[in-house]
Amino acid sequence: MAGTQQLSELSFATSNENKFQEAERILSNLGIKLNFFKTTLEEMQSNNLSDIAEQKAINAYKLVQKSVIIEDDGLFIDSLNGFPGPYSSYVYDTIGNNGIMNLLADSKIRDAKFVSIIAYCDGDYGVKLFESSIPGKISSSIEKGGWGYDPIFIPDGESKTYANVYDKDKFSHRAASLTKFSNWFLGKQKDNGQ
Ligand code: ITT
């Protein structure tokens, strides 16, 4: 349609609606329309987030059969030698934020980082990974609001957790990896004349 800018389109395969909603908002501001492909993807057991993300993207492409992204995240806590890291989803579903608080009860050192890997896959290109991480701290108590680990993760430079910061989408681990991805993806589309 004349005068209407066409958004580039692709799917995000995830079981996690919160992840999708944030990613949809972030990417629409960058000119990409994201479709929700709701599914629980098979995840390999590995200590390496990149390996998990790569395999997840291949599994997602088999299902979606079109350009697709997945995201794999991990909360890495320094004093726990990086735990829960690649096991963040399982740990959240089992011991949750209360369990993390208990593990850190005697710990003054509460440094942590949140890592996001976006993995893109299509039939021609194969898989490409985009990784970002945000340093921060585990709070001394569980705040109200947000989802997942939001109530216990304070990004550096902020006094509140992700659950209560003013605009998480502006600087989150997800925003950073999606920005890297969109730069590459929109450039690739331009090169292909789309
Ligand atoms: P998928 O279907 O996309 O795999 P998932 O929730 O299992 O969804 P991950 O394995 O990537 O996703 O997630 C690791 C854990 O970290 C999981 O418990 C998430 O809820 C949590 N998490 C990821 N990003 C978060 C964020 O921005 N804020 C709070 N918690 C987050």
Image (tube, helix red, strand yellow):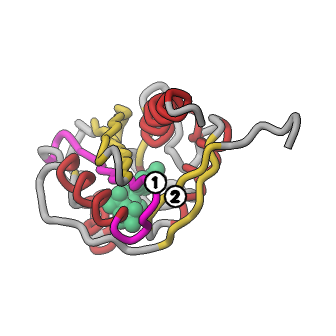
**Would residue 100 be found to the left or right of residue 17 on screen?**
left
**Would residue 127 be found to the left or right of residue 161 on screen?**
left
| Residue identified by numbered label 2 | 11
What residue is at 87 percent from the left and 34 percent from the top? 3
Q: What segment is highlighted magenta in the picture? A: 62-80
What residue is at 83 percent from the left and 39 percent from the top? 4
Graded by Cα atoms within 10 Å as few (under 14), some (14 to 19) or many (20 or more), the crowding at tag 1 reads some
What residue is at 24 percent from the left and 45 percent from the top? 76
Graded by Cα atoms within 10 Å as few (under 14), some (14 to 19) or many (20 or more), the crowding at tag 2 reads many
- Identify which amino acid the numbered label 2 is placed on: Ser
Q: Position of residue 68 (x, y in %)?
A: 44, 55
| Residue identified by numbered label 1 | 67
Q: Position of residue 73 (x, y in %)?
A: 33, 51
**Would residue 1 be found to the left or right of residue 150 on screen?**
right
- Location of residue 167 with respect to 144 vertically, above or below: above
Within 8 Å of ligand 1, the CB of disc 2? no
Of residue 8 and residue 87, the one placed in the foreground of this image is 8
